[in-house]
Image: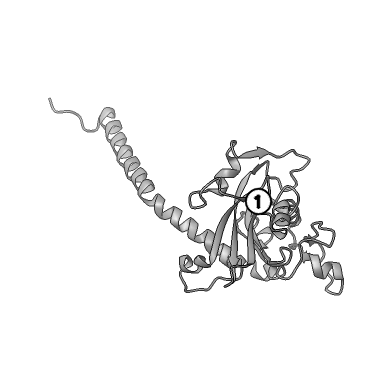
Amino acid sequence: MASNKDSIQNIIKVALLVCLACAIVVSTAAVVLRPIQQQNQQADLRRNVLQIADLYQAGVPVEVQFQQVETRLVDLQSGTFSDAFNVDNFDPRAAANDPSISSSIPASEDIAGLKRRERYTEVYLVNDDQGNMKTLILPVRGYGLWSTMWGFIALEDDLNTVVGFGFYDQEETPGLGGEVDNPRWKSQFPGKLVYDEAGDVQLELKKGGINPSNEIDATYRVDALSGATLTSRGVTNLIQYWMGERGFKPFLNNLKAGEA
């Protein structure tokens, strides 16, 4: 006797076969495209490093431009360079959540809203023709209003004067906190100093605008984002954290002393 094609059993069977076929196609595409996605993510990260260091040239392949950048691993605990991991395979984001190479941050110290801090992270150096470092690019991150903002700060060879600052990944409110990506706002950072003569972190965002004739404002402060108080506070907090004692300050001090 011929089977009923419109039976519930047949409908379920066909639906399952269609779902299985779709799952196989999607899974195969995810596996095949993953290397391409990773390459694109790496290229985007490198482009941001170049842009923060004011080295990016439109129209020139990123991988060619990035040859002038040296990637090194830093042990934040000792404040020195490290060879604990191969930088070619090191994932800074994964390191921040790996219990074996990260530690929880006490709430009283977690001004940037990180919860955990990795022991090792990548930094980027640009050297002159004599092999002397002329620019150092450091990764920074911290919580804004809606999410963690991931970015970089680039310093001149005095390890105090800012070359550039910006984020490559953030989900702040478009038109408000999202203005952290506005080139006009970011253009305020170059030339600002991070530390005062006592070595304290002074770079911060100031609500209400800066007074160019005021020496403190002109040296250490940047206009806060209009209508984005929490995002602005998040930017100041992440600068304070990462440039402070629990961030890169020990490493920068060692680097100045030739002991990194």
Nearer to me, 120 or 107 = 120
Where on the picture, by quarter, is residue 211? bottom right
The colour scheme used to paint the residues is one colour
Residue 79: percent from the left, percent from the top? Answer: 68, 50
- SS under mark 1: strand
Q: Dot 1: within a 10 Å radius of its alpha carbon, few (fewer than 14), some, or many (20 or more) residues?
A: some
Q: What residue type is labelled 1?
A: Thr
Which residue ends up furthest to the left in the rendered image?
1
Q: Is residue 20 depicted above or below 182 in this figure?
A: above
Describe residue 198's horizontal placement relative to residue 7 as left or right.
Answer: right
Q: Quadrant of the N terminus?
A: top left
Q: Image point 79% across, 57% down: which residue? A: 201
Residue at the limit of the structure toward the top, as seen here:
1
Could you tell me which residue is drawn at 51 percent across and 73 percent down?
58
* Residue 122 coordinates in the image, percent (x, y): 59, 53
Q: Is residue 238 above or below residue 211?
A: above
**Which one is nearer the viewer's eye here, 9 or 94?**
94
Query: In the image, 150: left or right of 189?
Result: left
Q: Which residue is more in the foreground, 41 or 72?
A: 72
Q: Name the residue under label 1.
A: 80
Q: Image point 36% across, 43% down: which residue?
A: 27
The number of numbered discs placed on residues in the rendered structure image is 1
- Residue in view at x 73 percent, y 53 percent: 249
Provide residue 224's location: percent of width, then percent of height. 76, 62
For the C terminus, the quadrant is bottom right
Could you tell me residue 182's position as x and y percent?
Answer: 65, 67
| In the image: residue 175, left or right of residue 58 | right
Q: Looking at the picture, tell me which residue is in the foreground, 107 or 62.
A: 62
